Amino acid sequence: GQCCRHSWALGWHWGCSPSEVVLTTSPCPLLPQSYTPTVFERLSVNLQMKGKPVELQIWDTAGQVDYDRLRPLFYPDASVLLLCFDVTNPHSFENIFNRWYPEVNHFCKEVPIILVGCKTDLRKDRSLVKKLWKNKLEPVTYHRGQEMARSVGAVAYLECSARLQENVQAVFQEAVEVALSSRSRNYWRRVTRSFCVLT
């Protein structure tokens, strides 16, 4: 069948590297193991949605504070936003509400949001948990993730582990489903639209 092509803009900050959001899944590698922050990079991902091939053009935009003025340039055509955080990094989690949500709510208020908790395998890492406890912190629970999703008006909350390859492709599939269903609400104004991922 004919392949649908969509664009996907990715952005993140140091709290959760892109390799922890999408590592290597079938049918193709999504992002490299090693990562160097960039201002702009394009990647291509092929997925199967209901038996039909979907090609995603991924627009990778840096999430560092230094690029705050450039990042909004990639927002105008977004069809769905993925706000991602590291479940073992409370600062990364807090940034969802304090930094990323205000930004995307300002530049693309009507675009649906999916909240994604990453690195879920590390919730059981005893040394890491012990380190958090010493600072009177703890990993972000699934329940807290759901609460945050409601706080930012997300249409869904998902968790994944790139290391164990658990639920990673499901994150992309959910995003595509949300984007496709958004057509009836007039989010898609052109044939090629973009997704935006912030972590």
Image (tube, rainbow, N blue to C red):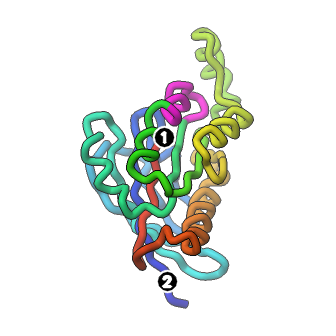
Earlier-in-chain disc, 2 versus 1: 2
Compare residues 198 and 18 and report the one nearer the observer: 198
Instruction: Identify the residue under disc 1.
Output: 101
- Circle nearer the viewer, 2 or 1: 1
Residue at 61% over, 67% down = 177
- Assess disc 1: are there few (<14), some (14-19) or many (≥20) residues with their C-alpha within 10 Å of its C-alpha: some
Residue 35 falls within the magenta-colored stretch: no
Instruction: Identify the residue under disc 2.
Output: 3
Q: State the SS at label 1.
A: helix
State whether residue 134 is above or below residue 127.
above
Residue 4 x %, y %: 49, 80
Judge from the rendering whether residue 20 lies leftward or rightward of residue 38; answer left or right. right
Furthest-bottom residue in this view: 1
- Assess disc 2: are there few (<14), some (14-19) or many (≥20) residues with their C-alpha within 10 Å of its C-alpha: few
Judge from the rendering whether residue 38 lies leftward or rightward of residue 159; answer left or right. left
Residue at 51% over, 71% down = 186
Residue 58 x %, y %: 40, 62
Span colored in magenta: 86-97
Residue 139 x %, y %: 65, 26
